[in-house]
């Protein structure tokens, strides 16, 4: 009976000692990094003070998609190439003699974009849509932080149908689930 009590006290203090020892071993790495900073105040470390500081992304990074709708000729090549079908385009040819303007490189626009939406919930970020764009208006930005509180925030609306005077045949005005996207 006396031996069981001594064994229990021994195990109790052994557990306390092992807990303190494992904490000290873990803190050894933390203290080494702390003293690296104390010795050299220019030591960068690995921590970025987000959101005031941002990581520099590598060249060719595939971030959030952006479409400059004023340069888009609504050829639908991006939607046809997309393996995830996350680009939705509703378009209509302009009436004969109707002037829709020109792109920044002088290409005349012949198609009205009633809807140009990108659902980033489904996007694979493969970049195939940007490679086939003839006017290079669809680009992948370097934005990497586009967290939202709802999935509707990842539904980008680029078309501005209010620019046209007539509505497409059989179309009803749809409510926008999210604000218009802006480049990063």
Image: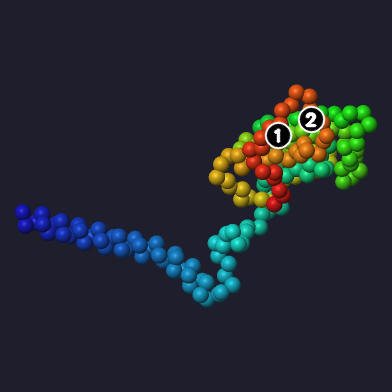
Mark 2 → mark 1, Cα distance in angstroms: 21 Å
Please tell me the numbered disc located at residue 14. none
Quadrant in the rendering for residue 19: bottom left
Quadrant in the rendering for residue 107: top right
Is residue 83 visible from the viewing direction of this image? no
Task: Please name the residue shown 71% across and 48% down the image.
Answer: 182
Residue 39 percent across, percent down from the top left: 52, 76
Please rate how many residues cluster around mark 2, counting C-alpha atoms within 10 Å: few if below 14, some from 14 to 19, many from 20: few
Task: Please name the residue shown 79% across and 28% down the image.
Answer: 168
Residue 139 percent across, percent down from the top left: 75, 45
User: The residue tagged with tag 1: helix, strand or loop?
Assistant: strand
Residue 3 percent across, percent down from the top left: 9, 56
* Above or below, comparing residue 165 to residue 51 in the picture: above
User: What residue would you read off at disc 1?
Assistant: 87
* Above or below, comparing residue 56 to residue 152 in the picture: below
Task: Please name the residue shown 82% across and 43% down the image.
Answer: 70
Please tell me the numbered disc located at residue 167. 2
Quadrant in the rendering for residue 82: top right
Q: Which sits earlier in the primary sequence, circle 2 or circle 1?
A: 1
């Amino acid at each position: 009976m006396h031996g069981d009590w001594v064994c229990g006290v021994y195990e109790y203090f052994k557990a306390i000692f092992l807990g303190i020892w494992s904490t000290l071993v873990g803190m050894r790495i933390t203290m080494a990094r702390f003293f690296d900073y104390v010795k050299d105040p220019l030591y960068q470390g690995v921590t970025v003070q987000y959101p005031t500081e941002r990581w520099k992304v590598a060249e060719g990074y595939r971030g959030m998609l952006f479409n400059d709708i004023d340069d888009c000729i609504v050829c639908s090549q991006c939607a046809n190439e997309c393996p995830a079908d996350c680009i939705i385009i509703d378009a209509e040819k302009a009436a004969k003699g109707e002037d829709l303007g020109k792109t920044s490189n002088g290409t005349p626009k012949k198609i009205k974009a009633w809807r140009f939406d990108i659902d980033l919930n489904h996007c694979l970020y493969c970049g195939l849509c940007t490679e086939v764009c003839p006017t290079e208006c669809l680009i992948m930005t370097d934005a990497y932080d586009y967290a939202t509180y709802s999935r509707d925030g990842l539904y980008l609306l680029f078309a501005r149908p209010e620019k046209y005077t007539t509505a497409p045949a059989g179309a009803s005005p749809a409510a926008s689930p999210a604000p218009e996207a802006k480049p990063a």
